[in-house]
Image (cartoon, grey):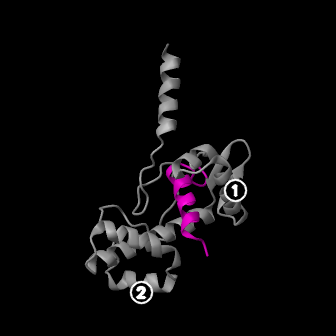
């Protein structure tokens, strides 16, 4: 079983473009910044995920999802989206539904998610208007999609550093 924090790492790598195949290699420092952890902490967790076959690690270059990691992430995001829809239909406001889905999606058995999805009418969009991915139907592309459960990353230091480099190159 993969825990919620592990999915946070997989989501960060995905959002930074580290998809299997055509995806880029994401520097460990970018993952660390995206998650608000130190580089050594991120490095340890990323190696653990690589040992489980969910990430590829190229020393000195970065990390990216494996096919298995991509599939695990898509299944988690699908469960997350299904739970969000269920919680909103049960009367929770969308933000509280998001929190509840995030805390439960990693523990939801596949057969329960399948049954819930069927009862809900196979929803394709979450209450926040984002697409809910489908396990087995999604294929990695070079450009990550903002699926339900994948938020834009706040990379303030990286953006500032890129802006400095750009202005130095122009000078």
Magenta stretch contains residue 20: yes
Is any atom of residue 145 visible in this view? yes
Q: Residue, x 49% and y 80% (percent of image)?
A: 108
Give the left or right position of residue 99, taking residue 60 as reference. left
Vertical position of residue 145 compared to residue 160: above or below: below
Indicate which disc residue 115 carries: 2
Horizontal and vertical percent for residue 115? 41, 86
Indicate which disc residue 91 carries: none
Q: Residue, x 52% and y 37% (percent of image)?
A: 158
Horizontal and vertical percent for residue 85? 32, 74
Nearer-the-camera pick, 154 or 51: 154
Give the left or right position of residue 40, taking residue 26 as reference. right
Q: Residue, x 46% and y 39% (percent of image)?
A: 156
Determine which residue is flagged by label 1.
Answer: 44
For the residues bearing labels 2 and 1, Cβ distance under 8 angstroms? no
Is any atom of residue 27 visible in this view? no
Q: Quadrant of the N terminus?
A: bottom right
Horizontal and vertical percent for residue 44? 70, 56
């Amino acid at each position: 079983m993969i825990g919620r924090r592990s999915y946070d790492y997989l989501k960060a790598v995905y959002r930074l473009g580290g998809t299997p195949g055509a995806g880029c290699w994401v520097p460990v420092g970018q993952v660390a910044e995206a998650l608000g952890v130190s580089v050594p902490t991120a490095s340890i967790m990323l190696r653990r995920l690589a040992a489980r076959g969910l990430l590829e690690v190229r020393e000195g270059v970065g990390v990216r999802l494996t096919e298995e990691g991509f599939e695990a992430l898509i299944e988690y995001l699908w469960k997350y989206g299904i739970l969000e829809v269920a919680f909103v239909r049960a009367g929770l406001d969308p933000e509280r539904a998001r929190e509840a889905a995030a805390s439960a999606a990693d523990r939801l058995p596949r057969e329960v998610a399948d049954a819930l999805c069927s009862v809900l009418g196979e929803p394709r969009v979450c209450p926040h208007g984002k697409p809910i991915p489908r396990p087995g139907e999604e294929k990695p592309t070079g450009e990550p999609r903002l699926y339900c459960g994948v938020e834009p990353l706040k990379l303030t230091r990286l953006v500032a550093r890129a802006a400095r480099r750009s202005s130095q190159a122009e000078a």
